Structures are given as structure tokens and as C-alpha cells.
Image: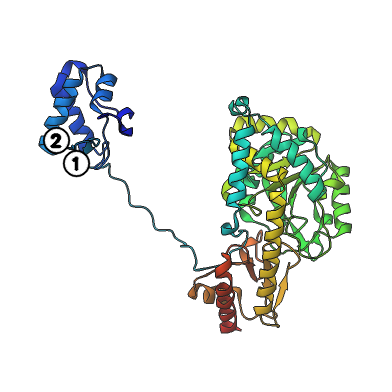
């Protein structure tokens, strides 16, 4: 019974040579304690376990422990494991850097969902079911395309909810849109498409990723009907047709037809970022652009807005001619989402819990949008309010300037973003991009009131 505690079988590393005997073993343990490898208060291996691991007599270890306890290095107690009694010198580490931009008190930053809404219970249940059902072979080296269970589930879900034309063989599981655009930029460049057009304005992070992976990035104007297709002259383009980011406009039906016709006629590739297509608040359904030209449009979706960005779970629905090149590039990159997360996601969709979660979030975000609109002065012009987790606020006339409003918001610890930073080249318009998803439910009222005060201060 004396050796029954859980510490008896732990593994430890000691710089000890058998020929140094008991004296050398004591010195090795002292060194482990002094150097911080055996930390104060931690249980040490039982005498029986350490003797067995080192191939020495148990009595040798017992005497070493007794000597070290007498010296103050170890602490013994009847019926309890032996523990380290003193703190050694841990390796010096540089001080943790202070964040340049600490988290705001009132979080109205765009592009973020309410993380407190993550369906923990449903995800846990889905994970348990996935583990219970998964055969042993599921834990082998993963498929290059992603979990077959998830790809089959996604094919049905995307067809039903977003109108995507897909079969599992054309779906590759990736680690979010950042991963997708990096892979696609490399594949397209290898096929001779060295330039990728982005909407102007658009999110600079994705433009930078494309450029870092060899693409020459150009901008294409966006107006109230979406991207100006007549200005396109690139072999590939990235678009956000359901809810343009950041302006929030929806690509008009005529432009959708024009864009897919242009791609088919020129052989260009359209990359559709359907980042928040599930969150539409009006009765006008807007399906995926991909359905109009499945062999020219790459559809990319993720869980970053519906569940949480930290999952790093996304998917590409590819034209047939890109499936093998993209799969090969993904194999070369080595990055894949965790298998268990893929299986859990498939279970979440199959059970209906994912749809239920999205419907709850849609209702909550719509309520937040309405509360935000009600709090804003009537003189302001909100845009992009039909869908998503953000709206754009532009001010009539030349005053106030964007920087003045942002300064007033910073004084109140409000986190949001200005429109100026999203343009390619010189900013063409100013405004605020206000996210109403990031704040926890209990904090949204305070965030809205703080924003209202900041706006009234400068208007």
C-alpha cells in the first residue's frame, strides 16, 4: 500500500551514469531540483519505480531519498508521496510582452461572433458520439481530403442551406479561409495565374496572405451593386457576394450572372468567400454564387462566424480541374484541422444541433442589429444591415472625420474599426465598421450606449 499513489510510475530524466553509484544519483537529483526540472511541491517517483527504471537496488534509492530529505531537498510524509521541498532556479525567460492593443472594454470589433454563444453542450455531445462511433482506422494518418464523414455531411448541408453544387469528392477540408487562400494562391500561380483581384475595399489580411504566397494583388471597385465586373482583367478574383466585406452590399442578380459569365468566357477562377452567408435577416434568400458556375467558382466556407474562429475549420468546394492540384498542395503544406473536430462537426450537423445553433444566433444578432440601429442618431447612414455581424456607418458631409470618432471611442474603451484601413491604395471613403457579434450578450447594451455617447460627442 505504501507505493499506491499515482506518482509511483512517472517518467523522469536524470543526468546519471550507473558507474557513479549512489553519490552520483544524489548529485543528479540535486541538479534536477536546482535547475528547476523537478519543481517545488511536485511529487517524485516512488523508490520502487525509480529503482526499476534505473536498474539499481531499491535500497539505494531509499538511502538517496533519505539523504536528500535530510539536506532539505525532499520532503517525506507517512502514507504520502515524497515531494520536492525547495525551489530551484528556473531557466530565465524574457518578460511576457504587454499587448499593444489590449482587449477593449466594449467590444464592437467586426468579424467576430459572440464566443460565449459557442454551443458547448452540443459540441461535447457530438464529440462523444463521434468517439463512440469512430472505428479504430479513423485514428490512422488522416485522409488528404479530410474526414469522409464530414465531407459527405457537408455536401448535403451546403446543398440544402446554401444551394451549393457539391459532391464529397470535390470538397477538401481546410483550416479556415486564411489557409484556403494561401493554398489557392500557390496552386493558381503554378498554373500561370500570377495575379489575383480583390474587391476594393476588402480585408487586408487575405490580400497579404495571397501576396506572401506569390500572387500579385490588384483591386477592383465595389459600388452599391457589388463588384464592378466590367473592371475585371485578372485570371482570378476573390469576392464576398452574399455580404460584401466590409461595405455590406449584396452582389446584385445581374452582376452575379455577369461575373460567372465572365469567368466561363475567360477561363478565370472566382473564389467565393461565404463568410457569413448563414446570417441573413431579410426575406430575400441569397444562395451561393458557386451554383451558377460550379466549374469556375471555388466556394469557401468556415465555422469562424457560426461557431468560433479558434476551431480553424473550413472547407473548399472546388471545380473538378482544381481538386487534385489543391489536394497535392495541401499534402505538401501538411496543415489539416484536427480529426476529432472534423468528426464532431459532422455529428453536429447530422444531429440538427448546428442548424438550431445558427437559428438561435441569427435571431440574437438580428435583435442586436435592431437595438444598435435604434440607438444611432437619425442623421447617420447605416449600410450593410441586411445580413451578417457588422454594419458600416458613414457620416453625411465632411464632418466629423473618421479619426475623430475613433478617438472618442478609444477614450471610452470601445473597440471598432475605421473604413479607411480597408482600401487598396488611397482611402476613397471614411466611416465606421461596427460589429455587433463580438460582445457577450450581457455586455451589448453597455457597448451600444458607450458608442452612442462617443458619436454624440463629435457630431
Q: Position of residue 362 (x, y in %)?
A: 71, 61
| Label 1 packing within 10 angstroms: few (<14), some (14-19), many (20+) | many
Q: Nearer the viewer, residue 435 or 355?
A: 355
Local secondary structure at mark 1: loop
Point out the image quarter for the N terminus.
top left
Q: Which of the 4 image quarters holds residue 457?
A: bottom right
Farthest front residue? 1
Above or below residue 449? Residue 88 is above
How are the residues colored?
rainbow
- Looking at the image, residue 454 sits to the left or right of residue 164; the answer is left
Q: Which mark is residue 54?
A: none
Local secondary structure at mark 2: helix
Q: Which residue is mark 2?
A: 69
Q: Position of residue 36 (x, y in %)?
A: 25, 39
Which residue shows up at 21% across the image and 41% down it?
88
Q: Nearer the viewer, residue 358 or 251?
A: 358
Which residue shows up at 65% across the image and 49% down it?
303
- Looking at the image, residue 190 sits to the left or right of residue 1; the answer is right
- Looking at the image, residue 375 sits to the left or right of residue 260; the answer is left
Q: CA distance from mark 1 to mark 2?
A: 8 Å
| Label 2 packing within 10 angstroms: few (<14), some (14-19), many (20+) | some
Whether label 1 touches label 2, CB < 8 Å:
yes
Q: Which residue is mark 1?
A: 85
Which residue shows up at 65% across the image and 74% down it?
372
Point out the image quarter for the C terminus.
bottom right
Q: Nearer the viewer, residue 327 or 195?
A: 327
Q: Which comes before the other along the chain, label 1 or label 2?
A: 2
Q: Position of residue 449 (x, y in %)?
A: 57, 78
Q: Position of residue 302 (x, y in %)?
A: 67, 48
Amino acid at each position: 500500500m505504501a507505493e499506491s499513489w499515482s506518482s509511483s510510475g512517472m517518467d523522469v530524466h536524470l543526468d546519471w551514469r550507473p558507474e557513479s553509484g549512489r553519490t552520483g544519483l544524489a548529485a543528479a537529483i540535486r541538479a534536477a531540483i536546482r535547475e528547476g526540472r523537478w519543481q517545488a511541491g511536485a511529487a517524485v517517483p516512488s523508490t520502487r519505480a525509480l529503482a526499476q527504471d534505473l536498474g539499481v537496488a531499491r535500497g539505494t534509492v531509499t538511502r538517496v531519498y533519505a539523504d536528500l530529505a535530510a539536506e532539505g531537498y525532499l520532503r517525506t510524509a507517512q502514507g504520502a508521496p515524497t515531494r520536492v521541498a525547495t525551489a530551484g532556479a528556473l531557466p530565465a525567460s524574457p518578460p511576457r510582452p504587454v499587448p499593444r492593443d489590449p482587449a477593449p472594454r466594449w467590444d464592437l470589433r467586426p468579424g467576430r461572433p459572440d464566443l460565449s454563444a459557442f454551443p458547448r453542450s452540443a459540441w461535447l455531445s457530438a464529440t462523444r458520439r463521434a468517439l463512440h462511433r469512430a472505428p479504430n482506422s479513423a485514428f490512422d494518418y488522416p485522409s488528404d481530403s479530410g474526414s469522409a464523414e464530414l465531407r459527405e455531411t457537408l455536401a448535403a448541408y451546403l446543398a440544402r442551406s446554401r444551394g451549393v453544387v457539391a459532391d464529397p469528392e470535390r470538397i477538401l477540408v481546410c483550416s479556415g479561409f486564411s489557409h484556403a487562400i494561401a493554398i489557392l494562391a500557390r496552386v493558381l500561380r503554378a498554373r500561370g495565374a500570377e495575379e489575383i483581384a480583390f474587391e476594393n475595399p476588402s480585408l487586408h489580411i487575405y490580400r497579404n496572405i495571397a501576396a506572401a504566397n506569390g500572387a500579385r494583388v490588384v483591386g477592383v471597385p465595389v459600388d452599391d451593386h457589388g463588384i464592378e465586373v466590367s473592371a475585371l482583367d485578372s485570371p482570378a478574383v476573390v469576392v464576398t457576394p452574399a455580404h460584401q466585406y466590409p461595405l455590406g452590399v449584396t452582389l446584385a442578380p445581374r452582376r452575379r450572372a455577369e461575373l460567372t459569365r465572365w469567368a466561363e468566357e475567360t477561363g478565370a477562377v472566382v473564389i467565393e468567400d461565404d463568410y457569413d452567408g448563414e446570417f441573413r435577416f431579410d426575406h430575400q434568400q441569397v444562395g451561393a454564387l458557386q451554383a451558377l458556375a460550379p466549374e469556375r467558382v471555388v466556394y469557401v466556407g468556415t465555422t469562424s462566424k457560426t461557431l468560433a474562429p479558434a476551431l480553424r475549420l473550413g472547407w473548399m468546394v472546388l471545380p473538378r480541374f482544381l481538386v487534385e492540384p489543391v489536394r497535392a498542395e495541401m499534402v505538401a503544406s501538411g496543415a489539416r484541422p484536427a480529426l476529432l473536430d472534423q468528426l464532431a462537426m459532422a455529428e453536429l450537423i447530422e444531429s440538427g444541433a448546428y442548424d438550431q445553433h445558427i437559428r438561435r444566433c441569427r435571431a440574437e444578432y438580428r435583435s442586436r442589429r435592431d437595438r444598435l440601429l435604434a440607438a444611432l442618431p437619425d442623421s447617420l447612414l447605416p449600410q450593410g444591415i441586411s445580413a451578417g455581424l457588422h454594419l458600416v456607418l458613414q457620416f453625411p458631409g465632411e464632418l466629423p472625420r473618421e479619426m475623430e470618432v475613433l478617438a472618442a471611442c478609444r477614450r471610452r474603451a470601445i473597440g471598432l474599426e475605421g473604413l479607411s484601413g480597408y482600401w487598396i491604395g488611397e482611402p476613397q471613403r471614411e466611416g465606421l465598421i461596427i460589429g455587433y457579434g463580438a460582445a457577450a450578450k450581457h455586455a451589448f447594451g453597455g457597448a451600444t450606449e458607450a458608442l452612442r455617447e462617443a458619436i454624440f460627442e463629435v457630431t
